[in-house]
Amino acid sequence: MYRAKLYDPEARSYRIRYAIATIMRDRIANEGAFNVCFEMLDEEEVIRAILSKGLKNPRLRVALERSHIIDLTHWLLRFPDLAEAYYRSDLQLYKE
């Protein structure tokens, strides 16, 4: 991915994709670039988008839960509505 684009304030979707790719690998190739994904004055929107995508994508959800580079609990505390959705989907997994 082209890292210079991470610094473009209008490139939120690019930062979301970059952060998701890094979380899926569970390894940071460039810590500065990963941190920029959350430092462009739209951190809340980026995190919310990643969590929302995690509800729809089982592979991303597992990567978020097992990640060593983010704290999923801390993220979910910031978004109670998404935390509830994660909790409900966990309950459905255990019922099946």
Image (cartoon, rainbow, N blue to C red):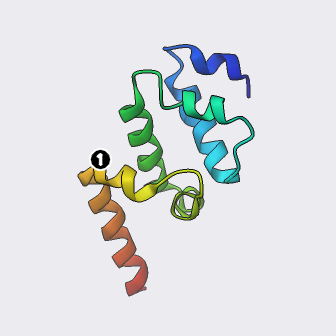
User: In this rendering, would 18 be left or right of 29?
Assistant: left
Quadrant where the N terminus is found in the figure: top right
Residue at the (65%, 52%) spot, across then down: 24
Name the residue: 31% across, 69% down: 88
Q: Position of residue 62 (x, y in %)?
A: 56, 64
Give the vertical position of 11 relative to 38 (above or below): above
Residue of label 1: 78
Q: Position of residue 6 (x, y in %)?
A: 60, 21
In the depicted structure, whether residue 11 falls above or below residue 86: above
How far across and down, in percent of the image, does residue 22 sit?
A: 66, 44
Q: Residue at x 32, y 68 (%)?
A: 87
- Mark 1: secondary structure: helix
Q: Left or right: 59 with respect to 41?
A: right
Q: Quadrant of residue 44?
A: top left
Q: Residue at x 41, y 48 (%)?
A: 52
Q: Nearer the viewer, residue 4 or 52?
A: 4
In the displayed image of the protein, which residue is found farthest to the bottom? Answer: 95
Q: Quadrant of residue 49?
A: top left
Relative to 65, say whether 74 is above or below: above
Relative image position of residue 61 (x, y in whole percent): 52, 60
In the rendered image, the quadrant that contains the C terminus is: bottom left
Q: At label 1, which amino acid type do we have?
A: Arg
Q: Nearer the viewer, residue 9 or 59?
A: 9
